Amino acid sequence: MLTIEGLKTFGADTENGLTRCMNNEAFYLKLVEKSISDASYQKLNEAISANDLDAAFEAAHALKGVLGNLALTPILEPVSEITELLRARTQMDYSPYLEKINEKSEGLKKLCE
Amino acid sequence: MEDFNRTIGFKRRILVVDDEEINREILGNILNETYDVSYAEDGQKALEMMREKNADFSLVLLDLLMPVTDGFSVLDEMQKEDALKQIPVIVMTSEKSAEVKSIKHGAYDFITKPYDMPEVILARCERIIELNEDKSIIRAAEKDELTGLYTREFFFEYIHRYEHVTGEQKMDAVVLNIEHFHMINEMYGRETGDEVLCSTASTLKELFEKETFIASRPDADYFYLYMSHRENYEGVFDGLQEELSHLTQLPRIRFRIGVSQDVDKTLPAENRFDHAKLACDHIRGDYTRQLSYYNKEDNDRELYGERLINDMEDAIRNGDFVVFYQPKFNIQTKEPHLRSAEALIRWRHPELGMVSPGAFIPLFESNGLIQKLDRYVWSEAAAQIRKWKETYGITIPVSVNVSRIDIYDPELENRLAGLVEQNGLSAEDLMLEITESAYADNAKGLIEVVNHLRDRGFKIEMDDFGSGYSSLNMLTTIPIDVLKLDMKFVRNMHKDEKSLKLVELIIDIAKFFGVPLVAEGVEDEAQFKTLKEMGCDVIQGYYFSKPIPAEEFETFVKEEKKRRE
């Protein structure tokens, strides 16, 4: 089960996340759980495999917004980096970023079980 | 306004537009307490919701990067629609560069992503809603709904504010009015009337768009313009007249323009426009003039006149009007001697001092008030004749003025006869002066009245003879007892030959008709001697005495009494 303590250990800036949620823990945790199944993760992976950088940027940007608001720092960091690279439509191998993002989001998913 | 917003009893609606559900939920959670929050997941949906009837959103929180229709497109669409344009938008973005761009696209403010503290978001929303509502309330009140020009109060307020900015710049106040505007409404219907007002407003804006200029429609078909000074307004509004003629095809419909130039900025703005309006109304119905300038002297004179009219009745009651007497002398005897007097009214105004008869008599003649004044003089004069008679045992006839309007009074005869009787006088003691121009006015009616008066024994003097337009022929039909030569002949008779000849001629005319001639305005010995030589019978003027109060006049009465003894 997801807890604030668990999120803290995960590395989330829970204080900030909670503030945005008007210090409503249950609400915050509910949104964090919901974020795991955010369609943007999948969109990002698919777009990068298809080398569709426009779509990839859109997905990364959207993800960045949500993760930023929830203050999920460990995932936010690689997402922010990839967003900036995609914004410039940089042609490169994005897999190390994707791996990191997927690894961290998997970690979060585990916390929720 | 703040209190109003806080205490008003309903929640305002906010539309949150974001493609990420989690973001929408976070914002919703923050705003729910205070606002009624609706959500849209893309720009297209958001626009549809805003266009819904009674949508009535007080604020839109808009994400910029969204699939399908992004935030910038939403802003652009909103700018195109009047109803949507009024809704303020706060843009949510994580990029600094997008902030400037969104403001340019019409956003009011922005919230950064990740979101600020909830308090900050709430405070921003509240502030923007408040600003926008204040603005729209002001916008609704400051503009005339029909023409979009300023309403009276805001117009004057803006002039006042504008003053601090322009300082020394010379400004003019201009008032325009559409003459016979009601005819447009009557003949073409209100809609056309409104159209005329609207196109007047828009034509005015076009005409002066390049200058310092502010305009108002304070009332019905009046337009007020406050604009940079110009020396001449001739032709300035021709474009407007053309537009009006084109719209109505009515030849009698036209603009009247009153201008107060280089206004006195120490006066309240309202007064500056009172002046321009005075000028504008001054030429109402005058088809020879379309443009009139305010003139301080005219205005002061008018105000002074108003004051005199207002004070007149009180003055009679308070005895501020005093009757003075100017002696008339017989000069064909060895020594000139007192023959009679003329009663002349003087006004000792408690605040204005001595008011010149030249200021109030023409004024009261024009509005009929002179009638009251005449009656007052008649009764004072009659009482005075009696008093002298009782005191000195001799009768000094006094002539009084009978104004044109008195002639139409059916009670005139009885009134005068009553006065004579009350004071134990005979009718010939109270002599009646009627100006020559009154004869010309209504010869037939006047002859009738004069005949009746003469039948009852009154003596009629024709005043100001030679100044009016009566033909010599009139003298044969009009019954008179004395001719009074207009004073300007006497004044000029030593200055130009023609006047001298005319005096001679009029003296002959009087002789021909067998009536005495009184010369008025005799000021010096030369005039006196000439008139005497020419055979003039009676003289009145400063040479003998100016008009004086009854007490002073007694000196003349005493002398005359002595002479007769």
Image (cartoon, helix red, strand yellow):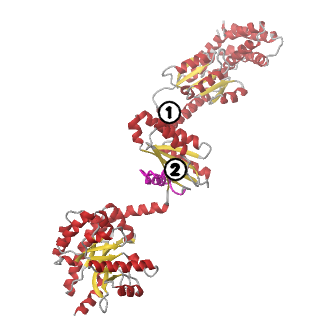
Density class for disc 2 (Cα within 10 Å; few <14, some 14-19, many ≥20) is many
Which residue does the image show at 55% across and 24% down from the upper left? B14
Residue A29: % across, % down? 63, 14
Residue that numbered label 1 is attached to: B5
**Amino acid identity at mark 1:** Asn
Q: Nearer the viewer, residue B97 or B182?
A: B182
B108 up-or-down from B416: above or below: above
Relative side of B489 to B101, left or right: left
Q: Residues within 10 Å of mark 1 (few under 14, many from 20)?
A: some
Considering the numbered disc 2 on the image, is that residue within a helix, a strand or a loop? strand
Where is residue B527 drawn, in percent x and y? 40, 84
Task: Name the quadrant containing residue B382.
Answer: bottom left
Residue B471 can be seen, yes or no: yes
Q: Which one is in front, B278 or A40?
A: B278
Residue B314 lies, with reference to residue B125, above or below; the image says below
Q: Which residues are magenta?
A: B264-290
Of label 1 and label 2, which has the lower sequence position? 1
Q: Which mark is residue B174?
A: 2
Using the image, name the chain to which the residue with label 1 belongs: B
